Amino acid sequence: MHNTGRFTGLAISAAAAALLAAIPPSVTAGVTLTGSALYLGGTYHPLTVPEDTSQYIEGYVNWANYNYVTPSQLCPWCSSVAVFSPEEFWPVTGLRDTRFDASVAIGLANLDDCLRGRPCTVTDPPYTSSGPRVLTDSPYTVFGYSQSGAIASMQKSDLITHPASGTVSFVFEANPNRPHGGILERFVGVHIPILDVTFNGATVTNSLRSTPLTTVDVVHQYDPIADFPTNPLRLLADLNALLGLPFEHPEGRSGAPLLQGQYQDSTYYLIPTATLPMLLPLTVVPFLGPLLATTLDPPLRVLVETAYDRTINPGAPTPAKFLYFPNPIQTACDFLSAVPNGWDNGIAYLTSDPTNRPFHTTPAGPYGVGGPAVYTGAIEAYGPPTPMPDQVPAPGTADVALPAAAESKDPVALTASPTERETSPSAPDGRAPASPAHVLRPSSAPRRSPRASAARSASVPGPASAARATTPSRAR
């Protein structure tokens, strides 16, 4: 297919999704929907009433739909169903709550019932009541975020071993089982008995080519749940990752994703972080804080990135490498080059002119000065990326930004109309996206239930050892 055809198809799909979102419920009742998108929540949020409010569930589903499921093009005309999972993690969510592995096992059993035509607990629009029913409108696209990403990962493994009758695809955000970056793969084989957390490895990617479980996996850079350092002994990176939990673990957030790579049935995207999480607390200080943050980011990012091996394809299972460290001479040169880069950032900020860079440096890419390109290529890919971008960059070339929502500074204050479309700004590395990045944003943001009012949705991952499900396998 020619590039023009690809872009035309992408535009038609996006326009159709926007049109559907704009049609009132009374009209959509007469529209024939093809399949269901099944949304699972993150820790604290089972997506059932009254544990969560109907406003929260609607906002969460809108956020996941407009920012991830719709742009994936896996489910353009699907009905939306919120699927129950406990989303508990003793003692984080409460002293009387279920421990993590058990919580995941319960959610997995309910999701499996949904996909196999058995009664399962769901919450249908307008999300005012929850209860059991049998889902029949396959194909299905499963959305998993954080803790529910562990559930979806195990479900994918089970579907490979015991296929369902219909077609199933997956969309992940903040996937703890992400093969390269997910915390459950970084420490694979570890079990924490008192918390009942099992680190069970990577989401599988080796479904049958003839009936693939097509998967899209998106991560926010420096989210410690899905973008954990390759070398955990780098303390600066650990501190940055710790602060990445409140700032980059993205419930309610969005961004313009860059194609990161393909591995068998899966396509991976990275949403870059403009400012290191460890520097974001500075930005609350008027004027001086943002100036310091933008000036310090380039040299500190070089040091933080020494803990990450960004040359590995995101679909390649990669446990922690405690001896990993990049070339020290190259690191020292990159650090020295990053200092004037930071000065140029500061001057551009002071003058409100992004082109005012008297030291003639170029804004650094997502991985900092001297860092590699985001795109790592395709390994045994089953086909073009999902969704197909207008073009796929070769290693070392400009990264491609695909359709997604613009970054929100407030993780729970997305107020634009669902049909609002806007052009994304240039990529975080200062280069223009290869194609226009139009976005869809939810009309109402997720609102936290009373049980979560004192804490952000800090989903600490860990899958269960469910008796009737296959644990994510490392076999390829």
Image (cartoon, grey):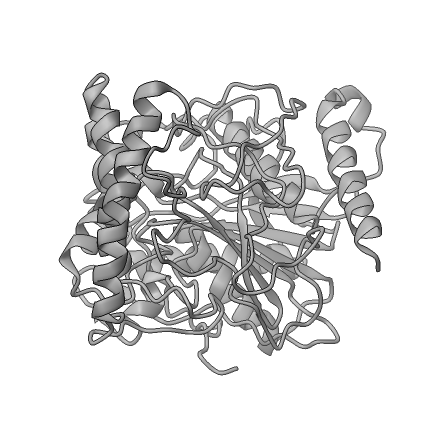
Q: Is residue 82 left or right of residue 19?
A: left
As drawn, 30 above or below 342:
above
Q: Residue at x 76, y 30 (%)?
A: 20
Residue 136: image location, x then y, percent: 74, 51
The image quarter containing residue 233 is: bottom left
- Say how many tags the image has: 0
Q: Residue at x 38, y 56 (%)?
A: 226
Between residues 66 and 472, which one lies in front from this camera angle? 66
The image quarter containing residue 206 is: bottom right
**Would residue 277 be seen by someone viewing this image from the given angle?**
no
Q: Is residue 141 left or right of residue 56?
A: right
Residue 341: image location, x then y, percent: 30, 42
**Would residue 67 be seen by someone viewing this image from the given angle?**
yes
Residue 51: image location, x then y, percent: 40, 33
* Quadrant location of the N terminus in the rendered image: bottom right
Q: Residue at x 37, y 61 (%)?
A: 182
Residue 219: image location, x then y, percent: 45, 51
Q: Is residue 35 left or right of residue 2?
A: left
For this orientation, the residue located farthest to the bottom is 475
Q: Is residue 287 left or right of residue 272?
A: left
Q: Residue at x 35, y 27 (%)?
A: 348
As drawn, 9 above or below 228:
above
